[in-house]
């Protein structure tokens, strides 16, 4: 993302999630059915239409979390398990905003 461009986020998003779209740092979130994750950046998910003219629309109900780390090993995503390689989600993890229970900016301080 171009650091000179401020991205306006949907008003119903939690403040820390809105901040993560414009300010790369460390954030934590509790996601329903997954558990606690940390991430460093967020993007508004865009819906692409590939018709004759193609279009891009934002989908304010979904967010893409980037550089995600699972902190509690829930749902088989234990990054410390020796028998499987950890999932890296190189293109981000798309999450329904309504499934975010809480989100925090700088969980270990700044």
Image: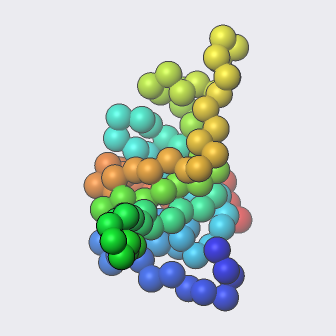
Q: Is 52 in front, or is 14?
A: 52
Residue 44: percent from the left, percent from the top? 44, 67
Residue 100 located left or right of residue 78: left
Q: Is 36 in front, or is 97?
A: 97
Image quadrant assignment for residue 86 = top right
Q: Please give the name of the residue rendered at 67% of the width and 88% of the height, measured from the top-left corner.
A: 4
Residue 42: percent from the left, percent from the top? 53, 62
Quadrant occupied by the C terminus? bottom right
Residue 26 seen in the current view: yes
Coloration mode: rainbow
Q: Is residue 7 above or below residue 66?
A: below
Q: Count the marks.
A: 0
Residue 43: percent from the left, percent from the top? 51, 65
Residue 28 seen in the current view: no
Image quadrant assignment for residue 35 = top left
Residue 6 located left or right of residue 57: right
Q: Please give the name of the residue rendered at 30% of the width and 62% of the height, measured from the top-left corner.
A: 61
Q: Is 43 in front, or is 50?
A: 50
Quadrant occupied by the N terminus? bottom right
Q: Please give the name of the residue rendered at 56% of the width and 50% of the height, measured from the top-left corner.
A: 92
Q: Is residue 47 above or below residue 33?
A: below
């Amino acid at each position: 993302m171009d650091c000179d461009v401020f991205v306006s986020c949907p008003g119903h998003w939690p403040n820390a999630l809105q901040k993560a779209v414009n300010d790369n740092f460390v954030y934590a979130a509790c996601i329903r059915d997954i558990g606690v994750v940390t991430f460093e950046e967020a993007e508004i998910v865009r819906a692409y239409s590939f018709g004759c003219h193609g279009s891009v629309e934002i989908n304010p109900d979904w967010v893409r979390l980037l550089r995600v780390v699972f902190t509690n090993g829930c749902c088989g995503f234990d990054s410390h398990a020796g028998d499987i390689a950890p999932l890296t989600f190189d293109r981000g993890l798309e999450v329904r905003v309504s499934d975010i229970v809480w989100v925090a900016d700088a969980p270990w301080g700044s």
